[in-house]
Image (cartoon, rainbow, N blue to C red):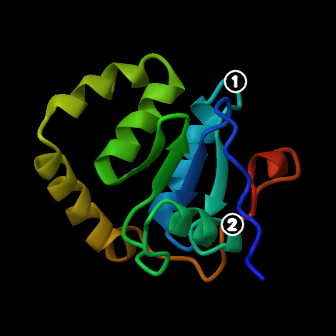
Amino acid sequence: MSASPSPVPDPTHPIVLFDGVCNLCAGVVRFVIERDREARFRFAPLQSELGRTLQREHGMDPDALETFVLIDADGAATRSSAVLRLLRGLGPPWRWLYPLRFVPRPLRDALYGVVARNRYRWFGRSDDCLLPTAELRSRFLA
């Protein structure tokens, strides 16, 4: 018997998969929540069952926690591409950074990789996943 497929992302609610024990990643989620005026984005830890399922469905290794993932109407994006698509979705002034997509991806991803490899050392990690407040719980899928 096969597992049922994960919910199809609602194009009006992009999904951000983040490292649930990374303090930097939790900070990024808080940054997005504070600036997402229309409450469009939904969130799930990479380590959650839903996060792992969505990663597999998009051809990613769910055990490689070196990136966050954005899943929207255009599909799944990782690394610097996910960051830029996320900023585009926040609206002005953040969307004005989206033209950085014209910087060659290997260069963007190299910088992203430096931060990703050092995120626990620089920002620390938590023993628990980010716990949303009651008012934000509906925006967290797992």
Q: Where in the figure is residue 118, as x and y percent of width and height?
A: 28, 72
Categorize mark 1 by other alpha carbons within 10 Å: few (<14), some (14-19), many (20+).
few
Horizontally, residue 53 falls left or right of residue 39, namely left
Q: Where in the figure is residue 121, as x and y percent of width and height?
A: 33, 77
| Mark 1 or mark 2, whichever is nearer to me | 2
The residue at 52%/54% (across/down) is 27
Q: Name the residue under label 1.
A: 38
Q: Residue furthest front?
A: 1
SS at mark 2 in the image: helix
Horizontally, residue 112 falls left or right of residue 55, namely left
The residue at 56%/74% (across/down) is 21
Horizontally, residue 52 falls left or right of residue 87, namely right
Residue type, label 1: Glu
**Quadrant containing the N terminus in the rendered view:** bottom right
Residue type, label 2: Leu
* Residue 141 vertical position relative to residue 126 in the rendered view, above or below: above
Q: Name the residue under label 2.
A: 50
Q: Where in the figure is residue 122, as x and y percent of width and height?
A: 33, 70
SS at mark 1 in the image: loop
Categorize mark 2 by other alpha carbons within 10 Å: few (<14), some (14-19), many (20+).
some
Q: Earlier in the sequence, mark 1 or mark 2?
A: 1
